[in-house]
Amino acid sequence: MEAQEIEVKYRVIDQDALLRALADHGVSLSAPVLQEDQAYAPIWWNYGKPKTGVPFGRLRTVQGTHLFTVKTPQDNEMACLEAETVVADPGQMHEALLQMGFRPTVRIVKRRRTGQAGRWSLCLDDVEDVGPFLEIETVTTADEPGLAVQAQLDAWATGLGVKLERVTDTYDSLVRLAQHHST
């Protein structure tokens, strides 16, 4: 059965308050790990066009391991069919993506701390150019309704009792916008 990754994302307003609330809910976070991502989009797609149904690629390097991921948004950008594998040679994977009709879009560099809350994965990310974010995600079967799962994740985040600003953009869009405004 195909897997679907469903997530909600929040801009963190007060990181210290969030860390206290997570600890109060029994969530312990890992030490920060550097992740460097190169995002890819089909050459015919441009920012501003809908993402639903469009496959997007990502080459991620974390602690010397290179992961290639394809995400295809379903209900929205935060509910995606996903396939991921380790690649031995990121340079050759980059060339393969170009030959398959993808183009590099933005580079995303972040420090990620991870934790668990029941069956949900939490990521506290400090993203270069855009700041701290909290992601709450889960993996379900492809036929589970993404919007309903997102409502459950959002209810849990709201229950933390800290000020969070929900965002619906992916990191590539947020980073692109921040870099566009700084030039």
Image (cartoon, rainbow, N blue to C red):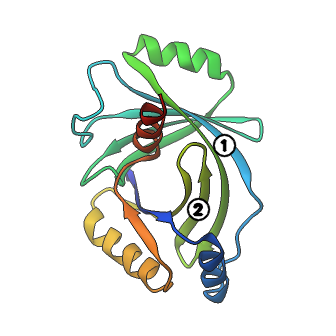
**Is 91 situated above or below 129?**
above
Cα separation between marks 2 and 1? 12 Å
What residue sits 46% from the left and 45% below the top? 171
**How packed is label 1: few (under 14 Cα within 10 Å), some, or many (20 or more)?**
some
Give the labeled residue for mark 2: 123
Residue 145 visible, this angle: no
What residue sits 60% from the left and 62% below the top? 124
Q: Position of residue 55 (x, y in %)?
A: 34, 34
Quadrant of the rendered structure where residue 42 is?
Answer: top left
Q: Position of residue 25 (x, y in %)?
A: 60, 87
In the image, 179 versus 79, the foreground residue is 179
Give the labeled residue for mark 1: 35
Instruction: Name the secondary structure under disc 1.
Output: strand
Q: Position of residue 10 (x, y in %)?
A: 45, 64
What residue sits 56% from the left and 43% below the top? 129
Q: Position of residue 128 (x, y in %)?
A: 60, 43
In the image, 29 versus 14, the foreground residue is 14
Quadrant of the rendered structure where residue 180 is?
Answer: top left
